[in-house]
Amino acid sequence: MNNKINNWVKKNEETIKSTYDDLHSNPEVSWKEVDTTKYLCSKLEQLGIQYETFEDQTGVVGYWGNSEDGPIVGIRADMDALWQLVDEEWQANHSCGHDSHMTMVLHAITCLKEIGFEPKGLIKIIFQPAEESGNGAKAIIEKGIIADLHYLLGIHVRPIQEMPFGVASPAIYHGAATLLKGEVKGRQSHGARPHLGINVADSMASIIQAINSIKMDPTVSASAKVTMVRAGGDNLNIIPDFAEFGIDVRAEQNSVMTDLIEKVHHVTITAGSINFAKVSLEPQASMVAAERSVELEELVKEAIVEAIGENGLFPAPVTPGGEDFHFYKMTYPNLQSTMVGLGTGLTPGLHHPKMKFNLDSLFNGVKILSLSLVKILDQ
């Protein structure tokens, strides 16, 4: 089977890159992946794979095989692009690699279809919207798509800082992430009479200092930082009475995130209101840390070695980045799930507006995903 997969990929290299180009040239932001959904539906139709779309959201789920014949396996790719300033113009931009993830998942299924593989079980091909919003996986969970899965595979291109081109890891240990948005309300006054006002700029200074002073266990990676502040108007002689701000919170472990969020909330409200301002703080998005699935990681490790060789196997990176993929296992603890880390030579980094990577890595991704599905369904 490995030889068949390798031969198919070699024969279809230009087609794989062409699919990537199609998706890369039409980026769409969270919940607006309309053309992307239509494109993927057309590809599934060409393969003769039944699929399901949703009236209230973007995304598509394909169904190949029969659950009565074996396990139910999901393979997932995220779809959305980021909204970024690129060359001084705001636009949708695939700078997180979701275009490549869709390409690899689509062609892994295409490969297996065209080499005559018959799944002993059911494969759910999940093209998930809105990963960047932190709510896309939750929406798929609410649809009941994940409830009966035994296994779930994902894949993500990795930056050069984590792994080099030509290698892959059987997992990515993402950390937990929470994005908070706050408001501070004070009282305006003339700049000459600051005692008559409540200056929200002072509140923000106290909040920033308090956030930066939080102490956590140094043996477990965690951080909190203020990432956005807006206060005041155009007049420089008015004490500002309103500010809004954002806080980015990261933690390697979910339990640490719980403790850190409690501290962030406490110091923000306490420090911000020390001058009698009123402070509010609400979560905007959150992602949980990865939980290991040892059984599936071992199967994927075997697939990596067979597909690209012993030298291609790379240790699973521990990364402070977040991924909503991990909500699936958090919701269903018995689910065996893992996300393949793919070395791509990606520079200068994920989410950079000029992100680029070696497109030949797509071939490794297709091989690994294809062989992983075979191994899971042939157990």
Image (cartoon, rainbow, N blue to C red):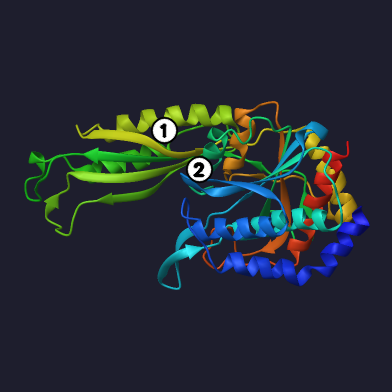
Tell me: residue 301, above or below residue 364.
above
- Which of the two residues, 132 or 254, is positioned nearer the viewer here? 132
Mark 2: give few (<14), some (14-19) or many (20+) Cα within 10 Å.
many
Taking the image as shown, residue 187 lies to the left or right of residue 145, namely: left
Q: Residue at 51% across / 56% down in the picture?
A: 33
Q: Residue at 70% across / 69% down in the picture?
A: 17
Q: Position of residue 78 (x, y in %)?
A: 60, 50
Question: Considering the numbered disc 1 on the image, is that residue within a helix, a strand or a loop?
Answer: helix
Callout 1 touching callout 2 (CB < 8 Å) = no
Tell me how many marks there are: 2
Q: Position of residue 308 (x, y in %)?
A: 86, 57
Q: Residue at 64% across / 47% down in the picture?
A: 51
| Amino acid type, label 1 | Val
Q: Which residue is mark 2?
A: 134
Taking the image as shown, residue 263 lies to the left or right of residue 129, namely: left
Question: Considering the numbered disc 2 on the image, is that residue within a helix, a strand or a loop?
Answer: loop
Q: Answer whether residue 121 is visible to the viewer in this image.
A: yes
Q: Which residue is mark 1?
A: 264
| Amino acid type, label 2 | Gly
Q: Position of residue 16 (x, y in %)?
A: 73, 66
